[in-house]
Amino acid sequence: MKIIGIGKNYVNDKSEIDAVKTGFQTIFVKANSTLVTNNADIPFPAITEQLAYEVELVAKIGKQGKNILEADAESYISEIAVGIDYTAKDVLAKSRESKGPWALAKGFDGASPISNFKPISAFPDLNNINFDLKINGESKQIGNSSLMIYNFSEIISFVSQYMTLEPGDIIFSGTPASGAGLNIKGDQLQASIEGELLLDFKLV
């Protein structure tokens, strides 16, 4: 199983998309040990003092594919979930000083909590999915997949040019352009899709 993420993939208004769409996507891979499921609480990571949250829709791949055409890409998605793509901002800043990669800043244990998945049949339009994040009961991020710079089909097609996608692989599709921030120990995070609470955990 691979955990694949895409960076900087949302705008605040659809009118902005054409101006920032270059065709080359910012892709990264996270370690399998980052994954947290079943709404388990997460120990606040000792490696950072700047734990940044980003709520994202997560697609699960249902069948093997290589060099997938955009027109066929949706058929490779079996399920959708909501998750948090965590970044250790201070670790990232230190890595960037020497033009280093994102691996440690996004690849630490617990950096990818996700909800249970819902079948793709529950989503008649992948380009119009509402999702949101509350922290300690306060709304922090609100997103809709129509504001993605690269939609699910474009992401899958692009990634599959470089690496074979396998059943069970999951793709974090980017976070809303506004509202991302830092967590502290004790925060309760609750993320929903179409108003249904799916992800609910605490940093302990």
Image (cartoon, rainbow, N blue to C red):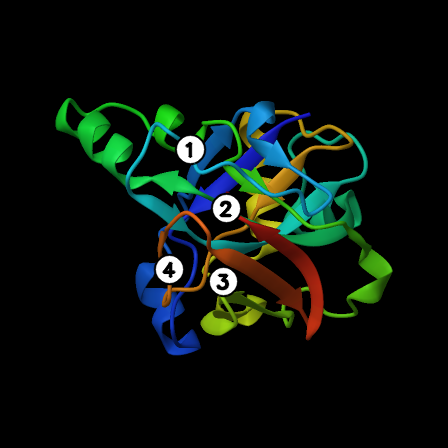
Circle 3 is placed at which residue position? 148
In what element is the residue under mark 3? loop
In what element is the residue under mark 2? loop
The amino acid beneath tag 4 is Ala
Determine whether 122 is above or below 155 in the image: below
The amino acid beneath tag 2 is Leu
Circle 1 is placed at which residue position? 45
Specify whether residue 46 is in view: yes
- Between 115 and 99, the one nearer to me in the picture: 115
Q: CA distance from mark 1 to mark 2?
A: 9 Å
**Neighbourhood count class around disc 1 (C-alpha, 10 Å): few under 14, some 14–19, many 20 upward:** some
Determine whether label 3 and label 2 are within 8 Å by CB.
no
**Neighbourhood count class around disc 2 (C-alpha, 10 Å): few under 14, some 14–19, many 20 upward:** some
The amino acid beneath tag 1 is Pro
Mark drawn on residue 14: none
Indicate the position of residue 59 as horizontal and vertical percent values. Answer: 67, 48
Determine whether 73 is above or below 188 in the image: above
In what element is the residue under mark 4? loop
Circle 4 is placed at which residue position? 180
Q: Earlier in the sequence, mark 1 or mark 4?
A: 1
**Quadrant of image for the N terminus:** top right
Mark drawn on residue 203: 2
Residue at the spot x=68%, y=64% of the render? 126
Indicate the position of residue 123 as horizontal and vertical percent values. Answer: 77, 66
Residue at the spot x=45%, y=27% of the render? 108
